[in-house]
Image (tube, rainbow, N blue to C red):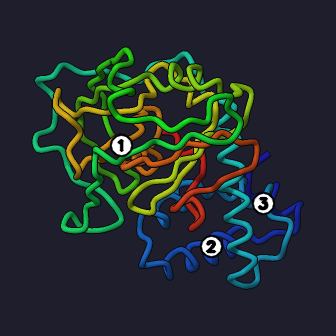
Amino acid sequence: MSQKKRLSLLGLDGAAILKEAKNLLAKRVEQPSRRAFLRNSLTLGGVAMLSGCSLSDDDNVEKALSSVSRFNDRVQGWLFDPNKLAPTYPESMITRPFPFNAYYGIDEVRHVDEASYRLEVTGMVADKRQWRLEELRAMAQVDQVTRHICVEGWSAIGKWGGVPFSTFLKRVGADLNAKYVGFKCADDYYTSIDMPTALHPQTILALTYDGKTLPPEYGFPMKLRMPTKLGYKNPKHIQAIFVTNTYPGGYWEDQGYNWFGGS
């Protein structure tokens, strides 16, 4: 059965739904990447299936789009393979210089004092002590040359080194059956990820970039590097990590971005 016929049986005007949804998205000029993200997520079948309300005003269209986004999160979670690796590249393909990207300008990059820095670990973990950088650097390190993919449409290849996040979570006695791992950052950014992604072999607490100490513009003292996620899911300047079963949201996610954010 065609999408048009399905919509007709449901009593929905597919053309009108799509037109109204696009009109709402077009109004959000201040968030172009969110518009693109939601527009790419939107199909007539998806809206018809997920929206139980009449799309007669902006609030109802927004609710319908949010339903599509939540549905996409669930589908991405179902499809995610914790054992499938993202592509890796030779160092000759590293993008130089690697682009700076944040919700602020490079002149506003946060500078964290190494001597006083302590990583806070809380939530569903056995060991809640704070960590110094020298302790993290003493753990076994790995390197990866992987592609960073931005929701805005660009990508770049970089080399990150650090501690496998799964190793760190096991070291602090995290409950590996918990749903979420959240992050709070020195630049007031925050985000969260699912536990299967946290345990993925390519998810690392990055302490270096291109063989050198992670510079401030790339997230010193550490960032979470996940080649299986879009760029906004890779937090920089991490100050606190917590494990929880309560949905933590995120800086962009709370403004409408998909939470799962798979690349």
Q: Nearer the viewer, residue 78 or 206?
A: 206
What's the residue at 56%, 79% (across, down)? 23
Give the distance between the C-alpha atoms of the residues marked 2 and 3, in whole angstroms. Answer: 12 Å
Q: Residues within 10 Å of mark 2 (few under 14, many from 20)?
A: many
Residue placed under numbered mark 1 in the picture: 149
Quarter residue 29 falls in: bottom left
Report the mark closest to the observer, 1 or 2.
1
- The quadrant of the picture occupied by the N terminus is top right
What's the residue at 30%, 33% (across, down)? 207
What label sits on residue 66 in the rendered view?
none
Residue placed under numbered mark 3 in the picture: 48
Task: Label 3, secondary structure: give it.
Answer: helix
Quarter residue 51 falls in: bottom right
What's the residue at 63%, 37% (across, down)? 194
Residues at circles 1 and 3 in contact by the CB criterion of under 8 Å? no
Give the distance between the C-alpha atoms of the residues marked 1 and 3, in whole angstroms. Answer: 30 Å
Tell me the kind of residue under disc 1.
Answer: Ile
Residue placed under numbered mark 2 in the picture: 21
Give the distance between the C-alpha atoms of the residues marked 1 and 2, in whole angstroms. Answer: 26 Å
Task: Label 1, secondary structure: give it.
Answer: strand
